[in-house]
Image: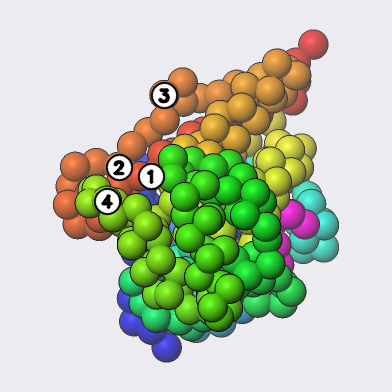
Amino acid sequence: MVRDFHVSVMLSEAVDALHVEKGKKYIDATLGGGGHAIEIVKRGGIVLGIDVDLDAINYVEEKIKNQIANSKNATLVRGNFLQITEIARENGFEEVSGILFDLGVSSYQFDKAERGFSFQREGPLDMRMDQSLSVKAADLINGLTKAELTKLFDKYGEERFAKKIAGAIVKARLEQPIHKTTELSGIIERTTGIREKIHPATRVFQALRIAVNDEIHVLEDALGQSVRLLEDAGRIVVISFHSLEDRVVKRAFLEFEDQGLGSMVTRKPILPSEHELRENPRARSAKLRVFARTTNYE
Ligand SMILES: C[S@@+](CC[C@H](N)C(=O)[O-])C[C@H]1O[C@@H](n2cnc3c(N)ncnc32)[C@H](O)[C@@H]1O
């Protein structure tokens, strides 16, 4: 068991934004280390926690037993939030007061070298959040053409040296297939040779993770389903960690407004406090947006 599975980002801001009421139902679509879900239960809510990663489910099950008396108020399900409607129905959460998405990977996943999310830890180029998926990052790195890699790094990483990096990868894999995270980050470092605030491999790793887990499409689809699971005045709260995700969230909320489904509560995203940024550097790119449902419109 890992002691510091994950430090929740914007814990009170996110749970405050859900307006938790005693006895009402909430879905935490990204359970992770359970920080947000447990806080919702502590405030009197009844929670359905979903995560694709079985390690997260097992960890939180144990934590709940030790930390909260009313553990029957939390139901934990392994699954992808792409199936949020089905999972909600199966568990009696078809009409809820709030849904939380805290996107991305947990620190546990990120820090575990064998999951392949970190370019600083030597591990296999895997990056699957759901370990039953068949395509790993290594399959993309060794299987896509130079043009496909360029497009991928450009689209999902917004990497300005996409073509140069793709070229270097294709050249390197002619010698031998690229299987390790550090092999890939080494190639990127040598190719760009740039010293920036963020590591030169950051954007390529982001792009691969998004592609392996189909993160953008899954998020778009899940938000569309979520708005229909909300009762009147119910809220969707999303914490995103990069501009592509934030754009999807903002666009979805504006579309819901156009369809008369409710209103975007946060015109500008809520950001972590200075204090949180000092305590938890992983919060630095977080943005929180809130949408409130209206069902009784004309
Ligand atoms: C940032 S962590 C959540 C942390 C959590 N809020 C906490 O306070 O500990 C994100 C979690 O979402 C899960 N996840 C990411 N995409 C998912 C998806 N499509 N369906 C279900 N879970 C997903 C990851 O496995 C990870 O455990």
Q: Position of residue 246 (x, y in %)?
A: 51, 37
Q: Position of residue 157 (x, y in %)?
A: 50, 47
Residue at (36% x, 69% y) in the render: 186
The amino acid marked with disc number 1 is: Ala
Give the number of callouts.
4
Q: Residue at x 41, y 30 (%)?
A: 269
Cα distance between the residues tagged 4 and 1: 25 Å
Kind of residue indicated by mark 4:
Ile
| Neighbour tally class for label 2: few under 14, some 14-19, many 20 plus, Cα within 10 Å | many
Secondary structure at numbered mark 1:
loop
Q: Is residue 80 magenta?
A: yes
Circle 4: is it few (<14), some (14-19), or many (20+) Cα within 10 Å?
few
Q: CA distance from mark 2 to mark 3?
A: 13 Å
Under circle 2, the secondary element is: loop
The label on residue 194 is 4
Residue lying furthest bottom: 1
Asked whether residue 57 is in view, the answer is no
Give the mark, 4 or 3, whose residue is nearer the N terminus: 4
The amino acid type of the residue labelled 2 equals: Pro
Q: Residue 57's spot in the image, x, y percent?
A: 58, 76
Q: Which residues are magenta?
A: 78-84
Asked whether disc 2 touches disc 1, contact meaning CB atoms under 8 Å apart, the reply is yes
Residue 224 vs 87, above or below: the answer is above
The residue singled out by tag 2 in the image is: 272
Name the amino acid, label 3.
Lys
Which residue does the numbered mark 1 point to in the structure image? 286
- Choose top left, top right, bottom left or bottom right for residue 123: bottom left
